[in-house]
Image (cartoon, grey):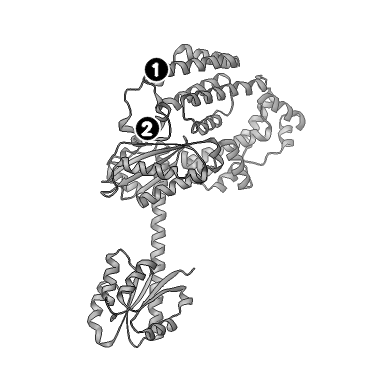
């Protein structure tokens, strides 16, 4: 496919053939899309092909060359025009210049003059492409910065001017909405990137450049957009978005879909509050079911905080049962919590995830469970598929009991001095190449024996532990630096970036790039 498209307009076929012959079309990578002999057909072809360049004689039937330029521009089309004229038609030159014609060629047409004009057009088009690419790159950078600041709680703007200075122009003084789209079906996980791309494509097609989007850690796809007078009501927009996303079932199979959206707002420095509104509206699926749309302004107010359910007795029971690895009693405690939660008529559906994290943290701390951050991230990863309260409490029970099962399998013994020393060595030298023989020598044991007691006491192999330590260090670098993925891999002891990517996703559950977008 050629880089540029061109249309030739002249009422004399001989002149059209001459232009076709004289132009260095292949050299400039220009394709002649159409040849027209009157202004009416020319405008039709310009509308159809949307050419980059138009060569037009001044004197053509129906609409002359100047009128063609004017009507094309009125239709929102802006090809570069080269006007062709006879000696007696210079009165048109001034108007052509006003309409920003690139050149004004006088008949008889000379090869060098024609190709100079074509070259100038190509140079202008190339420069415009570069400017457009630079503008898009800057806009993307502004969007990334905005989402990173929002996700990392670093977002702070005093007013609209402050917002524009940090994140670019075009978002103040408009009506905005924030939305959270939740798609729940575990089998879709292998196609997650596919359906996220599809949803974002639908969203972008609806709003073009007035939309932001981000895949969140809680499984919602956050959407943010501004409206104009032609956009319609918020309810109409989200109904259309819902229907369009549901059409994906034709290719991806059935899934549960919930869209929650915020109150309309004008001032963009209130973004965090409205994203939270959208998340809360999406979480209302736990209360009233999925496969629908929820508006935050229509949600009931005055929910009882989940913290009121965290009594001293419940906390002490969870700590005791976790510390003694009593799985059955822990199940009973969580079941009692579920009963109390469901018995309340003003349930804190929006605080459900915070409730789950609190219980998990309590269990992990009491059971002295290692790598707590990794498990929390996996819990958040699975939380996205919960649609009902029962789904959530089953998930919480499974994770809590799995912690105790793993501690039981590990023997729940205090670490020997040799294993503790080996851990300290790994924690200190994780950025270097670690050989098992060197590690064993550092604690005065054989490699086989160290591997055996390390696995027995920690419940994980040496290689797995090294990868976990390295990935924990990588997460900090992803959060706090702008180093490339490859540079972070090298700094955390990985010589091969692909292997690093594989291990990181295996341990954390998401890729380094996804982690950076969410937490940096």
Horizontally, is 142 left or right of 473 in the view? left
In percent of width and height, residue 125 lies at 39, 68
Q: Quadrant of residue 55?
A: bottom left
Give the distance between the C-alpha atoms of the residues marked 1 and 2, in whole angstroms. Answer: 19 Å
Whether residue 447 is situated above or below residue 57 in the rendered picture = above
Number of other residues with Cα within 10 Å of mark 2, as a class: few under 14, some 14 to 19, many 20 or more: many
Q: Is residue 481 visible?
A: no
Q: Earlier in the sequence, mark 1 or mark 2?
A: 2
Q: Quadrant of residue 237?
A: top left
Q: Which residue is mark 2?
A: 281
Identify the element where label 1 is drawn: loop
Whether residue 78 is situated above or below residue 136 in the rendered picture = below
Q: Is 211 or 387 nearer to us in this picture?
A: 387
Tell me the number on the disc at residue 344. Answer: 1
In percent of width and height, residue 304 lies at 36, 20
Q: Are marks 1 and 2 in contact (CB under 8 Å)?
A: no
Which residue shows up at 38% across the image and 65% down it?
128
Whether residue 24 is situated above or below residue 133 in the rendered picture = below
In percent of width and height, residue 468 lies at 61, 34
Badge count: 2
In percent of width and height, residue 47 lies at 35, 67
Q: Is 408 or 447 nearer to us in this picture?
A: 408
Which residue shows up at 40% across the image and 66% down it?
127
Q: Is residue 267 visible?
A: yes
Identify the element where label 2 is drawn: helix
């Amino acid at each position: 496919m050629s880089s540029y498209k061109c249309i030739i307009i002249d009422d004399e076929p001989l002149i059209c053939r001459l232009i076709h012959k004289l132009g260095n079309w292949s050299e400039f990578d220009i394709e002649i899309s159409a040849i027209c002999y009157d202004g009416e057909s020319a405008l039709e072809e310009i509308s159809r092909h949307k050419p980059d360049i138009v060569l037009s004689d001044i004197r053509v039937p129906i609409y002359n060359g100047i009128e063609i330029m004017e009507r094309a521009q009125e239709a929102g089309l802006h090809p570069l025009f080269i006007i062709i004229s006879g000696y007696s038609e210079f009165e048109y030159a001034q108007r052509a210049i006003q309409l920003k014609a690139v050149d004004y060629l006088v008949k008889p047409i000379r090869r060098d003059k024609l190709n100079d004009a074509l070259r100038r057009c190509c140079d202008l088009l190339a420069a415009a492409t570069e400017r457009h690419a630079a503008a898009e790159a800057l806009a993307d950078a502004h969007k990334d910065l905005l989402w990173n600041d929002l996700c990392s709680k670093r977002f702070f703007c005093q007013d609209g001017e402050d917002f524009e200075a940090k994140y670019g122009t075009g978002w103040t003084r408009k009506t905005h909405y924030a939305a959270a789209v939740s798609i729940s079906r575990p089998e879709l996980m292998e196609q997650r990137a596919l359906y996220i791309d599809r949803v974002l494509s639908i969203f972008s097609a609806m709003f073009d450049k007035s939309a932001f989007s981000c895949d969140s850690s809680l499984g919602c796809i956050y959407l943010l957009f501004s409206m104009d007078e032609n956009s319609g009501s918020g309810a109409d927009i989200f109904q259309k978005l819902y229907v369009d996303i549901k059409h994906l079932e034709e290719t991806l199979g059935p899934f549960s879909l919930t869209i929650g959206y915020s109150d309309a707002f004008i001032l963009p420095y209130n973004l965090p509050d409205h994203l939270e509104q959208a998340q809360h509206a999406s979480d209302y699926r736990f209360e009233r079911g999925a496969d629908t749309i929820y508006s935050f302004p229509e949600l009931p107010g005055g929910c009882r905080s989940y913290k009121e359910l965290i009594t001293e007795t419940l906390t002490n029971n969870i700590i005791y049962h976790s510390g003694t690895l009593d799985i059955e009693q822990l199940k009973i405690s969580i079941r009692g919590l579920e009963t109390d939660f469901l018995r309340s008529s003003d349930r804190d559906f929006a605080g459900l995830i915070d409730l789950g994290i609190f219980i998990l943290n309590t269990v992990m701390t009491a059971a002295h469970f290692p790598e707590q951050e990794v498990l929390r991230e996996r819990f958040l990863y699975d939380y996205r598929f919960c649609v009902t309260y029962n789904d959530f409490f089953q998930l919480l029970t499974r994770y809590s009991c799995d912690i105790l099962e793993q501690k039981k399998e590990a023997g729940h013994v205090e670490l020997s001095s040799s294993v503790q020393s080996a851990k300290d060595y790994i924690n200190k030298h994780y950025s270097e190449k670690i050989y098992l023989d060197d590690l064993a020598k550092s604690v005065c044991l054989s490699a086989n024996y160290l591997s055996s007691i390390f696995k027995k006491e920690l419940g994980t192999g040496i290689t797995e532990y090294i990868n976990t330590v390295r990935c924990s260090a990588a997460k900090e670098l992803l959060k706090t630096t702008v180093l490339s993925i490859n540079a972070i891999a090298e700094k955390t002891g990985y010589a091969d970036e692909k292997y690093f990517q594989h291990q990181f996703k295996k341990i954390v559950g998401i890729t380094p790039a996804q982690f950076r977008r969410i937490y940096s």
